[in-house]
Image (cartoon, rainbow, N blue to C red):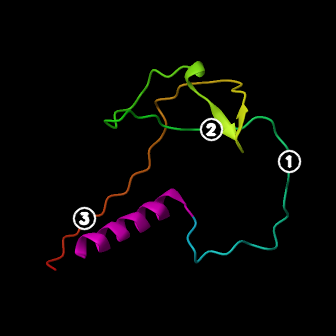
Amino acid sequence: MRGRCLFSIFLLCLSLSLGIPGKAQTPVQDDDVVRTETDLTNLLFTATDKQRRFITTLREEDIRVFEDGVAQNVFTFQRQTNRPLSLALLIDVSAS
């Protein structure tokens, strides 16, 4: 039980540090909505093998992207291994 509670608190702290909106937030209704169409979308992902080791040797021909079951063209493929990382640590030092 205590482990679940700590894990829940950790997830809450992590979501707050990453800026993931929670259920308590409501969208602002006074803002103008800007809509645009685009044919280019950035898709960031991490690839791991069955032993959860990072795969850093992927090539463009190794990637397939589908939208609603339809294969999409990969316009450009760039490997980035120096992306910033957000991390939160929670340490329970209470005697409970």
Q: Nearer the viewer, mark 3 or mark 1?
A: 1
Q: Which residue is mark 1?
A: 36
Q: Which residue is mark 3?
A: 91
Q: Please, what secondary structure does the residue beneath circle 1 have?
A: loop
Question: Which residues are the magenta region?
Answer: 1-20
| Residue 56 in the image, given as x and y percentages of width and height | 43, 25
Which of the two discs, 2 and 3, labels the residue nearer the N terminus? 2
Q: Residues within 10 Å of mark 1 (few under 14, many from 20)?
A: few
Residue located at (59% from left, 21% from top)? 60
Q: In this view of the protein, which residue sits in the foreground, 3 or 85? A: 3
Residue 71's place in the image compared with 76, above or below, is: below
Q: Nearer the viewer, mark 2 or mark 3?
A: 2
Q: Which residue is mark 2?
A: 43
Q: Quadrant of residue 19?
A: bottom right
Residue located at (14% from left, 78% from top)? 95
Residue 55's place in the image compared with 94, above or below, is: above
In the picture, the quarter occupied by the C terminus is bottom left
- Cα gap from disc 3 to disc 1, whole angstroms: 44 Å
Which residue type carries mark 1? Thr
| Residue 5 in the image, given as x and y percentages of width and height | 31, 74
| Residue 15 in the image, given as x and y percentages of width and height | 47, 62
Which of the two discs, 3 and 1, labels the residue nearer the N terminus? 1
